[in-house]
Image: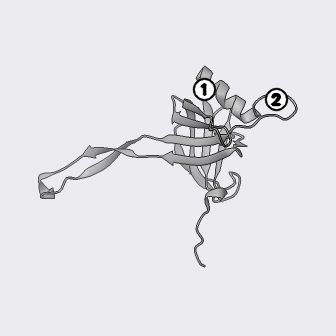
Amino acid sequence: MAQVPIQGHELKLYYNATGSGSGATYTEVSEAMEVACDAPADEHDVTTRGAGRYKQYEPGHIDLTLTFTMLATRDGSTGSVGTILAAFIAAKTAGTLLGWAVKDGDIDDTGTQGWEFDGKITGMVRGEPLDGATTYDFTVRPCYSSTSPAWRVTS
């Protein structure tokens, strides 16, 4: 069977107001635009004399960071910001833990995979261009939680 590239619009960002533990019910962040989940690991030097002139490394702790840009929306009847955006602003200002999932498809589809973790919004920047839509750039980092970050595959 021929391999087909995964398109960016197929990937999904989800959050859960109560964390990412077992049985979590996620809400898709459909207003998300650009999403990136960076996971570099610390590099531990394990160079031995037998390595000759080459240094040797082993990966250490993973430094997971989720960043995303979200389109600012407003409720047409009340004029207040959209429900998900309001939840993120409240979580940022209160320092509230949220569950996060960054998946390569619908979260309930068998074989869908990606990062799941409990994290807090550590950065929030509102973009107000003269021409164009207002956006919010969010940075999310894992926080202290009983649920460890993990790459999970839906079964």
Q: Nearer the viewer, residue 77 or 84?
A: 77
Residue 85 location (% of width, % of height): 70, 33
Q: Where's the C terminus, which quadrant?
A: bottom right
Residue found at the far top of this picture: 94
Q: In what element is the residue under mark 1?
A: helix
The residue labelled by disc 2 is 79
Question: Which residue in the structure is indicated by mark 1?
Answer: 92
Verify CB contact (< 8 Å) between mark 2 and mark 1.
no
Q: Is residue 136 left or right of residue 26?
A: left
Q: Residue at x 72, y 40 (%)?
A: 25
Q: Is residue 46 left or right of residue 95?
A: left
Query: Picture coordinates of residue 47 (x, y %)?
Result: 18, 50
Pointer 2 or 1: first along the chain? 2
Question: Which residue is at 56% across, 39% downward?
Answer: 117
Q: Is residue 102 positioned above or below 135 on the image?
A: below
Amino acid bearing label 1 = Lys
